[in-house]
Image (cartoon, helix red, strand yellow):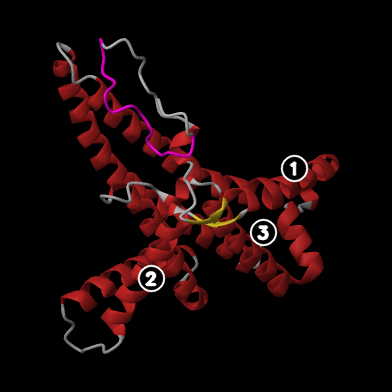
Amino acid sequence: MSADPTQVLAFETDCHIFDGCGFPAPGLHSFLFKPIWGDADSNLYFNKPMLLALLGSIIIIGFFWAAFAKPKVVPGKLQMIAEMGYDFVRRGIVYETIGKREGEKYVPLIVSLFFFVWMMNIWAIIPLAQFPVTSIIAYPAVLALIVYVVWVSLTFKRHGFVGAFKNFTGYDKSLGAVLPLAMAIEFFSNLLVRPFTHAVRLFANMFAGHTLLVLFTIATWYLLNGIGIAYAGVSFVMVLVMLAFELFVQALQAYVFVLLTCSFIQGALAEKH
């Protein structure tokens, strides 16, 4: 196995089963990259996940710009695809969760989050890229932080300080003596656990999916020797299965992320809690 931990998918290409070398299992080194520019020691650098995030943003902006720059009454194929994606998020997620009247103003935010997360996920199966940006915890954490700031500020704006406090703590006089304990649990759950799980849910799914995909890919190569070739075929089938499964998970995780975002916003806007 490569001695350099910053080489993604690093393994000896001449290492196969029965050659006396161990299986080069993927690990944390599969999520580390050499800087394309700058110095990692100085914490001022630009690496592959950053490049993919930048390219993904450009692709999304370019796609919707091209689709809606000159909209037509009878849409062309590009405009039609963009409208379908936009309406899916607007009607199927925002309207269903927040409502049409309150939710319309948040459609641009939710649409942007959905397609950004989906694009960052789908890099995992794009040739040459082959890495989901959201498997690096920093990216889901920043997205969850944006949602957290919107949710908290909106709660204070809608309900004031006292109302927001009751919202966050689940204040209910009918709880009687257990009210202080219930409020403490709700406060901790809402303001600390909720944003954490929002980020980790996306990160963990993409991290695990990429690890499994890398595992079966390396196993396919490793088993290409002698009788191991038969097992390599099975491993390759699993690579194809994982690719298909990842396509589903990538879209699902983008959907879940924005669905939870809409749920938070709906809770902030609700009059009664």
Numbered mark located on residue 58 in the image: 2
Considering depth in this image, is 108 or 100 the residue closer to the camera?
Answer: 108
Question: Could you tell me residue 111's position as x and y percent?
Answer: 42, 69
Q: Which residue is mark 1?
A: 185
The image quadrant that residue 67 belongs to is bottom left
Of callouts 1 and 2, which one flags the residue occurring earlier in the amino acid sequence?
2
Question: Could you tell me residue 74's position as x and y percent?
Answer: 16, 86
- Classify the position of the N terminus by image quarter: top left
Q: Tag 1's secondary structure?
A: helix
**Magenta residues, start to end:** 5-18
| Nearer the camera: disc 3 or disc 1 | 1
Indicate whether 242 appears above or below 97: above
Question: Could you tell me residue 165's position as x and y percent?
Answer: 78, 60
Q: Tag 3's secondary structure?
A: loop
Q: Main secondary structure of the magenta part?
A: loop
- Name which residue lies at 55% across and 49% down: 199
Of callouts 2 and 3, which one flags the residue occurring earlier in the amino acid sequence?
2
Q: Which residue is mark 3?
A: 273
Question: 10 Å neighbourhood of mark 2: few (<14), some, or many (≥20)?
Answer: few
Q: Is residue 72 left or right of residue 151?
A: left
Marks 3 and 1, how far apart at CA: 16 Å
The answer to if 12 sits in the magenta stretch is yes
| Nearer the camera: disc 2 or disc 3 | 2
Q: Tag 2's secondary structure?
A: helix
- Name which residue lies at 36% across and 31% down: 212
